[in-house]
């Protein structure tokens, strides 16, 4: 039968392979810097598809925004999801608040805080950096000095730098300085939202960003952004043409604010995010902060008791992503591969730094996951000739998990 085309000209189909042949029989325990393990409720929600413009989705979006507002600690209703990773929500913040002629001060302490500067350069803004290459945080005094020398329209910073494990200790104070000098503040809370205190309204953030796959313990590919009411009024008055369609906040608000079509929403990811946020609200933020703090501190104590050194001093150490030094001459890639091969546990390497990183976000902060990752790391190191006392590390981990920690 002739179907109207020359079958001889059609390229032959490739040899295919089902996922069941590719995925490991035992799933890896994801204990790196993200993505993180997800709960059964989140996993079930991620397998559902509904009409993205129907009445059911309207209720989902309504609930999601209320729960996200709790996570961000904001009264703003200008909360929306973004089809893409956390970097996509950062790009949404950048492209709506910056354009040629606008000045931005970028606080760069690693890969992800620096990425905001790259994005700002990409939209034509005038970009200045305060940069540290010694894995130390930028402090309030450095920012205050920068504002004395120059006026800026926007300041960008991270609460926690995932790439090296540095916490911006002066996060709230820096935001205050920026606001007093007439600048709007874009805050990256990708690995910190719900893992440690973050108060969007109280601290004066104008755009707060997070990804689903880290502290929120949802799936990769759907992120969340919240704009302050002041930032939203500014966006509404924007006279410069918006170069993006998907990242245009005003267009996006058609869906997230009025349940009208913008583009086809990532339905399963939104449903997964709904369930992740619901579980956060059920746990409550104070309880969640305490769980993360106890878990990370116990793991850190176990790592040190075993004989390894933590990369960042405690005074500005990020608890959400713990960076660990390995002895000179040790190939971190081989250590990580041994952990996967022997124990089906995966942790992260780093971006040019001689460290490995263990995540302490969401479902990673469960006792059974802590014991497994610490034992896997210690045993892999011993296998590669690093003399560690794995048993002591495990004992100290257990001891510290039983001791409550008072938040700072």
Image (cartoon, rainbow, N blue to C red):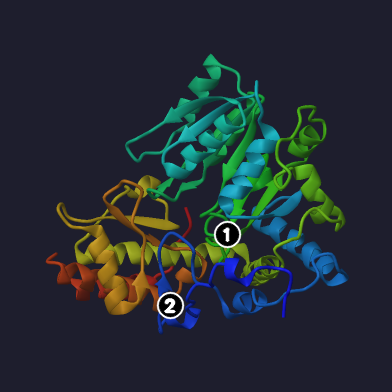
Mark 2 residue element: helix
In the rendered view, would you say 405 is above or below 275? above
Q: Is residue 90 left or right of residue 160?
A: right
Return the residue at label 1.
194
Front residue of 22 and 267:
22
**Residue 89, x across and y down, in percent:** 63, 48
The residue under the point 62% across, 31% down is 123
In the rendered view, would you say 2 is above or below 352? below
Binning the other alpha carbons within 10 Å of mark 2 as few (below 14), some (14 to 19) or many (20 upward) gives few
In the rendered view, would you say 80 is above or below 335? above
The residue under the point 77% across, 55% down is 263
**Residue 18, x across and y down, in percent:** 50, 80
Note whether residue 399 is visible: no
Return the residue at label 2.
22
Alpha-carbon distance for marks 1 and 2?
Answer: 34 Å
Front residue of 285 and 243:
243
- Which residue ends up furthest to the top in the rendered image? 149
Question: Which picture quadrant has residue 139?
Answer: top left
């Amino acid at each position: 039968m002739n179907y109207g085309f020359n079958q001889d000209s059609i390229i032959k189909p490739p040899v295919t392979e089902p996922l069941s042949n590719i995925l490991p029989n035992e799933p890896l325990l994801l204990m790196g810097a993200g993505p993180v393990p997800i709960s059964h409720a989140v996993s079930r929600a991620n397998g559902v598809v509904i009409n993205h413009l129907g009445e059911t989705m309207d209720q989902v979006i309504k609930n999601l925004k209320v729960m996200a507002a709790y996570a961000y600690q904001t009264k703003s209703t200008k909360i929306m999801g973004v089809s893409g990773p956390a970097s996509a929500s950062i790009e949404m913040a950048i492209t709506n608040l910056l354009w040629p002629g606008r000045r931005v001060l970028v606080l760069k302490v690693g890969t992800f805080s620096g990425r905001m500067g790259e994005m700002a350069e990409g939209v034509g803004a005038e970009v200045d950096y305060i940069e540290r290459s010694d894995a130390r945080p930028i402090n309030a005094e450095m920012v205050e000095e920068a504002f004395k020398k120059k006026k800026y329209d926007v300041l960008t910073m991270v609460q926690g730098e995932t790439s090296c494990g540095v916490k911006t200790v002066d996060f709230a104070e820096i935001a205050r300085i920026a606001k007093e000098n007439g600048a709007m503040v874009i805050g990256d809370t990708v690995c910190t939202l719900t893992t440690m205190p973050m108060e969007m309204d109280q601290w004066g953030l104008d755009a707060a960003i997070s990804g689903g796959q880290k502290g929120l313990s949802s799936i990769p590919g759907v992120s969340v952004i919240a704009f302050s009411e002041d930032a939203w009024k500014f966006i509404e008055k924007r006279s410069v043409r918006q170069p993006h369609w998907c990242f245009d906040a005003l267009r996006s608000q058609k869906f997230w604010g009025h349940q009208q079509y913008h583009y086809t929403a990532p339905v399963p990811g939104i449903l997964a995010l709904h369930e992740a946020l619901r579980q956060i609200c059920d746990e409550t933020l104070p309880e969640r902060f305490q769980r993360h703090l106890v878990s990370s501190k116990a793991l850190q104590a176990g790592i040190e008791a075993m004989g390894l050194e933590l990369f960042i001093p405690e005074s500005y150490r990020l608890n959400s992503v713990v960076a660990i030094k390995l002895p000179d001459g040790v190939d971190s890639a081989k250590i990580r591969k041994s952990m996967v091969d022997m124990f089906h546990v995966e942790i992260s390497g780093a971006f040019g730094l001689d460290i490995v990183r263990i995540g302490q976000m969401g479902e990673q902060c469960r006792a059974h996951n802590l014991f497994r990752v610490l034992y896997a790391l210690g045993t892999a190191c011993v296998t590669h000739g690093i003399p560690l006392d794995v048993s002591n590390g495990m004992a100290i981990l257990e001891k510290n998990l039983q001791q409550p920690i008072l938040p700072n």
